[in-house]
Image: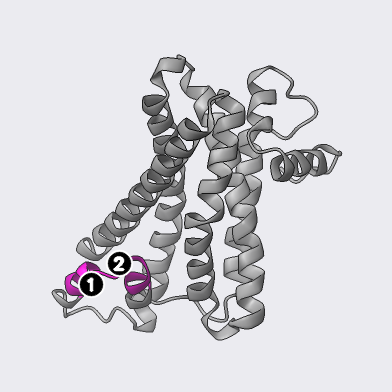
Amino acid sequence: MFEFDGKLPRTLRVLLTQPGQLALEYVAGRRQPYVSPLRLYLVTYLLHLFLLSFLAPHPLTMPELAQMYDPSGFLARLMASRGSIDWSGPQPQEHFLEQVHWISQALTLLVFLGVAGIQSLLLMRLRRHYLEHLSLALNVYAFYLLLCVAGDVVADLFWHREMPQAAYQIGSVLAISALPLYWCLSVRRFYRIGWPAAIAVAVLLTIGTALLASVLQIGMLAVIIETS
């Protein structure tokens, strides 16, 4: 995946400077000069995971994960109802974090598959194939993950002790600022629609992504807690 043959620099340049163009090239069949959407997504996702694991001074405990993903306190109450388990203790911690790690990777795949489905519904009148929507979604999330990689480095430099929490907060800020802007530019270029429609689609996709990711994250942790 990391083979360096000139494709990756070219792909990143287009990804960063021409939102939506990579998906257009892919759909048009001009695929040879660029890294494929799935491979690009996997490279950025694995790099993000590596930095979180490598730079973080210590892994988050289950209570810390619950507090970070669920400000409502639902997961905290769920853990409190199972008082026989020491959620922060060293013995179960490694088992819990391993489950979180693998399940979260599977859920990440579900997020962009679901978002591509939302694109299909919002832009049904354009009669695009699902894989075309998916290629755009993969490129948009690859861009977002590149920003998160930069955020990981910034979080480690300025908030090393709280690096995972800081990286999560930076990612959240990017998700409500840079991500909708990139969605808007990508949607306008890829679907060739006007600004009002592009803005509306970008806002709905951003909200849909946030809701889908939040529900899946909370659901994942709730299942782990209930089955422990």
The amino acid on which the numbered mark 2 sits, given as a three-letter code, is Asp
In this orientation, which residue lies closer to the viewer: 42 or 34? 34
Position of residue 202 measured from the top left corner of the image (x, y, whole percent): 47, 40
Tell me whether the residue at label 1 lies in contact with that at label 2, contact meaning CB atoms closer than 8 angstroms: yes
Residue situated furthest right in the rendering: 6
> Residue under circle 1?
73
> In what quadrant of the picture does the N terminus appear?
top right
Q: Amino acid at mark 1?
A: Gly
> The C terminus is located in which quarter?
bottom left
Which label number is shown at residue 89?
none
Q: Position of residue 101 (x, y in %)?
A: 45, 60
Mark 2 burial class by Cα count in 10 Å: few <14, some 14-19, many 20+? some
Q: Residue at x 73, y 43 (%)?
A: 17
Render colour scheme:
one colour
Say whether residue 84 is left or right of residue 173.
left
Residue drawn at (49%, 17%), measured in percent from left and top?
128
Which residue is rendered at x = 40% and y = 53% of the image? 103
Residues under labels 1 and 2: Cα distance? 6 Å
Magenta segment includes 73: yes
- Asked whether 159 falls inside the magenta stretch, the response is no
Q: Position of residue 133 (x, y in %)?
A: 50, 27
The residue that mark 2 highlights is 70
State the image quarter where residue 79 is shown: bottom left
**Quadrant in the rendering for residue 68:** bottom left
Question: For the stretch drawn in magenta, what is the main secondary structure?
Answer: helix
Spot occupied by residue 93 in the image (x, y as percentages of width and height): 38, 75
In terms of secondary structure, where does tag 2 sit?
loop
Q: Which residues are magenta?
A: 65-79
Is 12 situated left or right of 163 in this image? right
Within-10-Å neighbours for mark 1: few <14, some 14–19, many 20+: few
Count of picture labels: 2
